Amino acid sequence: MTTKTLPLDLAERSYQIIIGPNLLESLGEQLAPLLSGRQIAVVSNETVAPLYLSRVVSALEKSGFRVVPVILPDGEQYKNWQSLETIFDTLIENRFERSSTLLALGGGVVGDMSGFAAASLLRGVGFVQVPTTLLSQVDASVGGKTGINHRLGKNLIGAFYQPKRVVIDTETLKTLSPRDFFSGLAEVIKYGIIWDAGFFGYLEENMAAILNLQNDHLTHLLYTCCAIKADVVAQDEREQGTRALLNLGHTFGHAIETQAGYGQILHGEAVAIGMIMAAELACIRGLCNRETVLRIKNLIQHANLPTTAPAHFTPEAYLEAMGRDKKVSGGKIRVILNGEIGTAELHTDIPPAQIKRAILAHTDR
Ligand code: NAD
Ligand code: GLY
């Protein structure tokens, strides 16, 4: 498999997404021409650091970087102020300057937190994403959304802050747990539903090969998803319109994650159930036919993802959590609903009774 480069075009904040095998080894050479300073903090966690930190540190040191590692506890439940404090304490103690850089080595949790730390330390230091989960490679590392959770809602505190480079080493997927790989597939399927019917069809035909981690399929999938994300973000960096489509299933999904307790139901798992609820709601409102709901549900099932929410989650609790979503405007819940495969739109003014019906149709009894 060869290395591929995708540009994300954002005027002076433009950057490249590099996708290929064994890219960790050349990180120093890749970053040296991009970064003005030579001080770099590698933020990772207790699971990823033992696997990849030493390789990253020696690659950076070879190119003259002084590296400070920051190792956080692992889990969505640690995507909070306390972890940010740990990052800030280390960087301030090590006299970081505006020319210094934070490099996120890990999944979406490490990436989102490191990006927010980079955006706020000294009002902005350099930031590089080295995502190591499928979910972070196809979605979280690209586009500059950073942040932490609040106990009342997911990702409610954060900033838009673009990295200077995204380096996707495809070999890192080989150590990922199957459950985390499946979780990433939810965001992959999302791109097919909202943007690209051909890609959705490709996923329907090739899910077995993808689940076997066949290299050519993984490359195609990573490249296609990053290309769609780069296109969407270049059109609408700050989510004034099109970018909101990337939140398909997330309004329901965030409500599921919040109700379950962070880390209990994985982000991709919650999004998968959320996309089925969104498709149900779209069908109730006449935006798509029943066959489309079934295709979405079947593909999610083939990706080994859950298709129903636990029985004890009540529709009232969803509505409460959905009312705190970032997309709420004028107190009104706004959700992304698919039309036929490959299309989606933002919808407001949906009667709560219809939302409840869609939730209950995909909740365990
Ligand atoms: P995660 O970061 O928790 O990673 C999942 C698990 O995999 C963790 O236990 C992690 O330690 C482990 N891991 C990471 N890389 C590994 C590897 N190569 N080998 C073995 N284990 C590895 O979760 P995630 O699914 O990557 O990301 C979910 C987070 O991303 C959520 O907080 C979500 O809100 C966020 N997100 C952000 C955006 C965005 O645009 N910023 C988009 C989608 C999701
Ligand atoms: N994951 C949604 C976005 O980046 O906009």
Image (tube, rainbow, N blue to C red):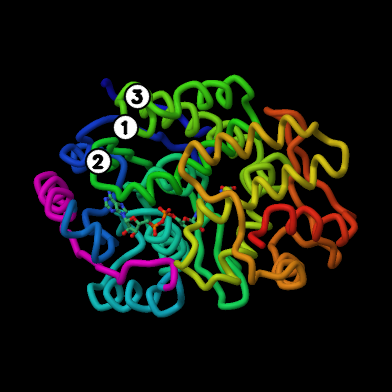
Q: Is mark 2 within 8 Å of ligand 1?
A: yes
Q: Is residue 309 left or right of residue 39?
A: right
Amino acid type, callout 2: Lys
Dot 1 crowding, Cα within 10 Å, few <14, some 14–19, many 20+: some
Question: Which residue is label 1 attached to?
Answer: 213
Question: Which residue is label 3 attached to?
Answer: 4
Amino acid type, callout 3: Lys
Give the mark, 1 or 3, whose residue is nearer the N terminus. 3
Residue 24, x across and y down, in percent: 21, 41
Residue 224, x across and y down, in percent: 48, 27
Q: In this view, does 360 lie to the left or right of 137?
A: right
| Mark 3 to mark 2 CA distance (whole Å) | 19 Å
Query: Residue at coordinates 47% horizontally, 43% vertically from top-left?
Result: 142
Query: Residue at coordinates 90% horizontally, 55% vertically from top-left?
Result: 349
The quarter of the picture where residue 189 lies is: top right
- In this orientation, which residue lies closer to the viewer: 9 or 285? 285
The region drawn magenta spans 53-77
State which quarter of the image contains the N terminus.
Answer: top left
